[in-house]
Image: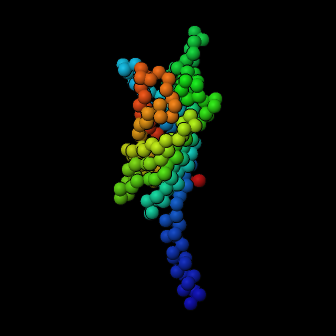
Amino acid sequence: MPRLSTLVLALLAPLSVMAAPQTYNIDTLHSYPNFVVNHLGMTNIHGRFDKMTGKIVLDTAAKTGSIEAKIATASVSTGDGKRTDNARSRDDHLRSADFFNSAEFPEMVYKSTKLNFNGENLESVEGTLTLLGVTKPVKLNVTSFKCGPHPFNKKPMCGAYIEGSFKRTDFGMKFGVPAIADDVKLAIGIEAYPE
């Protein structure tokens, strides 16, 4: 009887491991948030943040998990980082108290509260965005999501692209509205690898 119990446990062990949640670290070199905001009603300004860290916990069997992404606000980049005439660049202005106030609030954080699956497909993420010390709900739609072996080194990985929008005035970022639009489109491209 003890041998049978041992055999059953040995057979069930791989199943419990497969169903267990897996934690992934966000690859900072291949993941970054980007945004679009209308400028003067004339055109859209695109920007990105060059530094983001975080973790993803995924249980594909239970269709549950979580995402936490920490974005360094001082890493904002819009293509106007330094000027030769010594005038303040757009990126420096965005780091100032008028916008991201990076000195006082060095991070903004997106933290999920629920992952929404449709069958095997992750369709959306419900969560909160903390910006300028204010936390508000923001839902992001998942336009692509895939886990599998890396095509070159064959190690397991997951990738996703999620996007949504929010009003910056909800977080107290009021400078320039309405000439600089209140609505901000946010998208985050992610590649992540198991811990």
Considering only vertical position in the picture, is 7 above or below 190? below
On the image, which quarter does residue 84 sit in? top right
User: For the view shown, which residue lies furthest in the bottom direction?
Assistant: 1
Name the one closer to the observer, 75 or 185.
185
Task: Find residue 83 and report its image quarter.
Answer: top right
- The colour mode here is rainbow
The residue at the point 46 percent across, 53 percent down is 114
Q: Residue furthest right?
A: 103
Rendered view: 15 above or below 104: below
Residue 59 image position (x, y, % from top left): 48, 59
Residue 103, visible in the rendered structure = yes
Residue drawn at x 40%, y 46% as measured from the top left: 142
Q: Quadrant of the N terminus?
A: bottom right
Q: Describe residue 116's horizontal placement relative to residue 94 as left or right.
A: left
x, y percent for residue 55: 55, 49
Residue at 40% x, 19% y is: 40
Number of callouts: 0
> Looking at the picture, does residue 127 appear above or below residue 46?
below
Look at 44% across and 53% down and name the residue there: 115
Residue 144, given in percent of the width and then of the height, sits at: 39, 46
Q: Nearer the viewer, residue 22 or 106?
A: 106
Task: Give the vertical position of 118 relative to 164 (above or below).
Answer: below
Q: Nearer the viewer, residue 44 or 60?
A: 44
Residue furthest to the top: 85
Lateral position of residue 124 relative to residue 27, left or right:
left
Residue 185 versus residue 76: which sits nearer the camera? Answer: 185
Percent from the top left, x then y, of residue 95? 57, 26
The answer to whether residue 27 of the structure is visible from this angle is: no
**Which of the 4 image quadrants contains residue 182?**
top left
